[in-house]
Amino acid sequence: MPQINVLSKEISELIAAGEVIERPSSVIKELVENSIDSGARHITVEVKNGGTMYMRVTDDGCGMAFDDVPKAFLRHATSKISEKDDLDNIFTLGFRGEALASVCAVSKVELMTKQKDDVYGTRYVIEGSVEIAHEESGCPDGTTIIIRDIFYNVPARAKFMKKDVTEANAVSSIVQKIALSHPDISIKMIRDNRVEFNSSGDGELYSSIYAIYGKDFVRDLVPVEYEENGIKISGYTIKPLYAKFNRSFQNFFVNGRYVKSKLCSAALENSYENMIMTGKFPACVLMIDMHPSQMDVNIHPTKAEVRFIDEKQVTNAIFFAVKNAFLKSGLVYEFETKQQRDWYKQEESEPVIQQEIMFTPIEDIAKKEAELNISAPVEKVENSPVTVEKPTVSNGWAAFDSEPEQVKEYVTFCSGDEEDSPKPVDTKNIDLEAVKSACQAAEEGFRYLNAKAFEKREEPVVETVQPAAEQVKAELPEIKVIGEAFGLYVIVETEGKLVMIDKHAAHERIIFERLKSRNCRQYSQQLLVGIKLLLTGEEIDALENNTQLLEDMGFAFDFSEKPYITATALPTFLMECDAEGIICEVAENLRSHKLNPQSSYLDDVLHNMACKAAIKANDKNSPQEMKALAEQVFADEKIRHCPHGRPVMFTMTKANIDHQFKRT
């Protein structure tokens, strides 16, 4: 057996430093957390060349005494732990006393610090764990640490450093996380002599998010506030419509410390189920506050991960916190337009919030292209004297003429008589009385929604209405259907707002909620000739073991001719769909989850069923049907997104419209 040697102090410190210091961002993280623990209210972080050559952290914290400075650079030297019981009540960010010792082992460190009541401060220089200078010096209250030439004495590790821009991005990312976790502290980030961001330190999380991610990001956030079983969840999460393409914007903080947690991420994404588009991920800034004894933050060298004693309580708290936030917000999106810009004036450009839509004659487009050399693709609308111009974006603005000429536009209104073909109406000479009389037809008629894609029936379907449902219906705002646009969008006026409802998305969500709630027995239709299918034994067993679930969804099967089954009843809204394919999908999903058959496992199948059964674009619907659809959308808070994540409706306020017509 080879001889066992005791490593020298120099080698052992380099090995220990490698467990904590991996790159410049690791150094910044440790130093900024020490500044926060010192009670600092203002922290400045500066890096040059990605931090490989120069890093500086300045704070206005409590500072250190002259005699304590050398001790701070010793391994396992800390002011936060004195006995073993202190490990169960740690409320600070750092406590193991390894940060400064690891930093000075692989870099050149200069520290200047002063306590408030001291006459002189302290200047301390240490390189490669070797003390160079320890002297009194004049300096402001607080602490400033300058790190130079990281890994200068460990070339093997230095060669694995990435490009300066990559290292700087890593530093910026970690400082952003710290700024978000401590909105009461003003944190400034300087990168290569340029201020990257500067949080206000006013104690408002919203202000910190605004300083780091900008106004476009914070505009789409929903506030979160929830507490359960001693676990408090607060912060902001993004509206489902504005989800991101990756998880980079998921920020979780446990007791003020940023952590990477698959558990928290899974709980967040579960709360967005059926509300977010496939391939997108929610973004958030969520604070999780709980007693330190209920978790372990010491499972990772940099404390970037955390382990919870009761994981179920944490996931439930995050899930219900986000769900409650959605219920409170309502998730009704407002369609925004912005004021037209005069391209002949030299103005400072601003970012676009929403793209505006205008109509411009072909002659003006050709004239403008010749003058400004703007290439704007043009689409000619069939049977219409109006040309739709797709704007070309330049510096965040749509390239439109500042003063377009007045043009004649035709608008089609939906009347109660479906046999009458739409007639063009000159917007200059609209007969308001005729429009009102046409809209009054939408206020009368049936109040039910036919389950079979709004198919007209001679006898209305009478549904049993519970007293609670009557109360909800009584609280609905007055709804007036204006008409239908492009064969897909229902236009509704209510409470001083103009609402556009995507009838396919809305109907799809209504059907999906019916299926998911297992309340489709009333829509079950017996078949004169059953649908016979050949299935495997496992699939048949799965269907048989979930007969109750299938009946609640409106299905009924005869299992007397195995290995064949016969579907004897289907939900009415699936009568014209591919029933065989749907039944096979249901059987396969139930077989895959036979140990725990829940309706949630059928979500993908339910999505397809709802999409196939919902009304489609250009389907003709009467005003009564459109009004019934609008009433169901306003009555149920769940109908805000289709199962694939697309929004069901947008609103445009009267004040917004008045502003566009220069009335305000």
Image: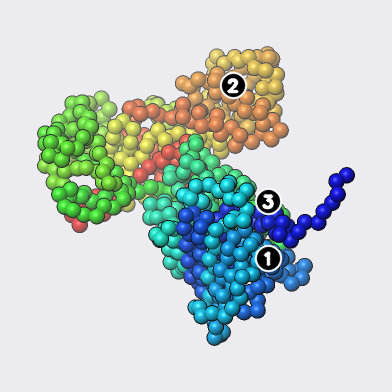
Which callout, 1 or 2, points at the residue further toward the start of the chain?
1
Residue at image x 23%, y 32%? 377
Q: Mark 3 is on which residue type?
A: Glu
- Mark 1 Cα-neighbour bin, 10 Å: few <14, some 14–19, many ≥20: some
Q: Dot 3, how many residues are within 10 Å of its Cα: few (below 14), some (14-19), or many (20+)?
A: some
Whether the residues at callouts 3 and 2 have beta carbons within 8 Å, the answer is no
Mark toward the viewer: 3 or 2: 3
Eyeballing the image, is 434 above or below 100?
A: above
Residue 275 position within the rendered picture, expressed as x and y whole percent measured from the top left:
49, 41
**Disc nearest the viewer among 1 and 2:** 1
Type of amino acid at the residue the image marks with label 1: Gly
Quarter of the N terminus within the rendering: top right
Cα separation, mark 1 vs mark 2, equals 61 Å
At mark 1, the secondary structure is loop
Q: Quadrant of residue 552?
A: top right
Return the x and y of residue 225 as percentages of the image width and height: 53, 59
Q: Which residue is mark 3?
A: 311
Q: Which residue is mark 1?
A: 97
Assign a secondary structure to mark 2.
helix
Mark 3 or mark 2: name the one nearer the start of the chain.
3
6 relative to 636 in the view: left or right: right
Q: Earlier in the sequence, mark 3 or mark 1?
A: 1
The residue at which mark 2 appears reads as 584
Closer to us: 331 or 106: 106
Give the quarter of the image for residue 253: bottom right
Tell me, yes or no, if residue 217 can be seen here: yes
Q: Residue at x 51, y 32 (%)?
A: 607
Q: Is residue 510 visible?
A: no
Image height of 283 relative to 37, above or below: above
